[in-house]
Amino acid sequence: MLLLAACASALLAVSLWWTAPAVLVRATHRDLDHRAARELAAARAADRRARRLAEDLVERERTWGERLSKIALLYGISPSRWPRVLDPGRGLLAAQDPERLTEGMDAYLAGLERARALIAGAETENPDLASRTPSILPVPAAVSEPAAFFGPRTSPWTGQEEFFCGLDLAAPEGTPILAPADGRVIFTGRARRESAPRLWQFGSLVVLAHGPEAATLFGHLSRIEVRRGDLVRRGQRLGTVGKSGWAVSPRLHYELWTPQEGAWRPTDPLFAVLDQRLDDRQRSLEQMLATSAPEPVDRLPGVR
């Protein structure tokens, strides 16, 4: 019995001698695997946070670049003075390599600072420039929806190709229409069909002059609450949304006019909307300056 017990103990010792290290190794490997998995998951989470932060910073810089370029257009700042790094076509904020993206963001940020200084200088020279520059959507964004954008389209009335010179915002009838900036009312009523057949289609109109840099036009009104010669402030009511003229549903027709080569011409009204982003297109200052409705266009009512 003692001999058998001794042999069994010897066999068990030998078995443990060979199996215990293997079990310890496997346990160690499992612990290392779990630790590595946790560290890898933490690294991936940190990478996702860093990417989200970088994307947020890029989007913020891009948004400010677009806003400042719009202001430069409305202020009449020359493209030759404008920082070229803010041109979306240069792709400074589109690099995939982290190092190149960081360099691009630094250069873009420096361009934003130069642009801010140019705009601040223009406002110092002309103290009322900011207040009379169109900058807000004329109807509340919460109750409006873009129905037609500036550019070529197929006419819903004739089925023919045409160039749409403004921005249509669908909104409930009676929605207040607000002045996008300080200005003077230079026209109210309906355009004459003989001299302005395109504008005649928009029914009851209000036209505001915002100094020598811009004018705005509002159409399809159901009620006009200002008179010619009135001075209005940004946010003041001009009237209410309706469906006068050629409109099958309540909407506001909004146009932005700027002086180009000695004549007033319609350009994209989105350039005068700083409080909302209604599309994903990004344009350089040169591209915005080159944007205008093709000939022929009706004469802007109230402008001599």
Image: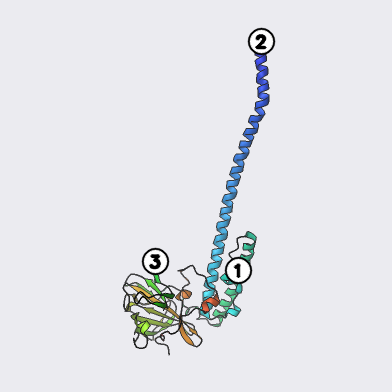
The amino acid at mark 1 is Tyr
Residue 133 screen position, x and y as percent = 48, 78
Residue 259 screen position, x and y as percent = 49, 84
Say if mark 3 contacts mark 2, CB within 8 Å. Answer: no
- Determine which quarter of the picture holds residue 24: top right
The residue shown at (68%, 24%) is 17
Q: Few, some or many C-alpha atoms within 10 Å of disc 2 (few <14, some 14-19, many ≥20)? A: few
Q: Nearer the viewer, residue 20 or 132?
A: 20
Residue 220 screen position, x and y as percent = 34, 77
Mark sitting on residue 142: 3
Q: Secondary structure at mark 2?
A: helix
- For label 1, the residue is 108
Query: Does 292 sit left or right of 147 as displayed?
Result: right
The amino acid at mark 3 is Ala
Where's the C terminus, which quadrant? bottom left
**Mark 3 or 1: the one toward you:** 1
Residue 82 screen position, x and y as percent = 59, 77
Q: Nearer the viewer, residue 20 or 160?
A: 160
- For label 2, the residue is 2
Give the spatial CA distance, label 3 vs label 2. 94 Å
**Mark 3 or 2: the one toward you:** 2
Q: Few, some or many C-alpha atoms within 10 Å of disc 3 (few <14, some 14-19, many ≥20)? A: few
Q: Tell me if residue 293 comes above or below residue 50 in the rendering.
A: below
* Label located before the other in sequence (2 or 1): 2
* Label located before the other in sequence (3 or 2): 2
User: Can residue 236 be seen in this snapshot?
Assistant: no
Q: Tell me if residue 38 comes above or below residue 93 in the rendering.
A: above
